[in-house]
Amino acid sequence: MSSSDLSRRTWGINEQATPEEQRRATRYVASVADSPADCRLLLDALGLLPARMTATHGLPGYRAGCRCDRCVAANRRRLQRQRATTTADCPINTTTNYGGTE
């Protein structure tokens, strides 16, 4: 069997999945997992998790999927800043009198 045969059913001892096969397997596992913990468990069992995962907390961590208290608080602050500037700068939210009598 060639290494490009994606429909193969068996693997040799020294045979490794190509990066494309790993990506497809990861996406499939993520699509059928019931929860993030289930997805992580399945990916770990298949050997598809990175060897070393670095944890970045704050807004980058929230965007990467971390939901610890620090990351959630950073996202909450971002949303508050965004809402504060949007409501003050948005012309729809301001009242303008166009020549009417008051």
Image (cartoon, rainbow, N blue to C red):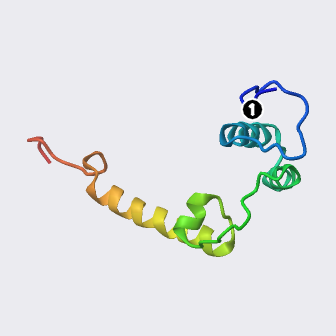
Q: Quadrant of the N terminus?
A: top right
In the rendered view, does 57 fall on the left or right side of 46? left
Task: Please tell me in which quadrant of the rendered image residue 18 appears.
Answer: top right
User: Which one is in front, 102 or 43?
Assistant: 43
Q: Position of residue 43 (x, y in %)?
A: 81, 51
For the point 62% across and 75% down, which residue is it? Answer: 70
How many numbered callouts?
1
For the point 72% across and 37% down, which residue is it? Answer: 21
In the rendered view, does 93 fall on the left or right side of 98? right
For the point 79% across and 41% down, which residue is it? Answer: 29
Secondary structure under tag 1 reads: loop
Q: Position of residue 42 (x, y in %)?
A: 86, 49
Task: Please tell me in which quadrant of the rendered image residue 51 appears.
Answer: bottom right
For the point 71% across and 28% down, which residue is it? Answer: 4
In the rendered view, does 68 fall on the left or right side of 78? right
Q: Residue tagged by mark 1?
A: 3
User: Which one is in front, 91 or 18?
Assistant: 18
Q: Position of residue 69 (x, y in %)?
A: 67, 73
Q: Residues within 10 Å of mark 1 (few under 14, many from 20)?
A: few
Residue sitting farthest toward the left: 99
Instruction: Examine the rendered structure and indicate whether residue 1 appears above or below residue 86.
Output: above
> Given the image, on which type of amino acid does mark 1 rest?
Ser
Q: Position of residue 13 (x, y in %)?
A: 90, 45
User: Which one is in front, 74 or 45?
Assistant: 45
User: Which one is in front, 84 or 60?
Assistant: 60
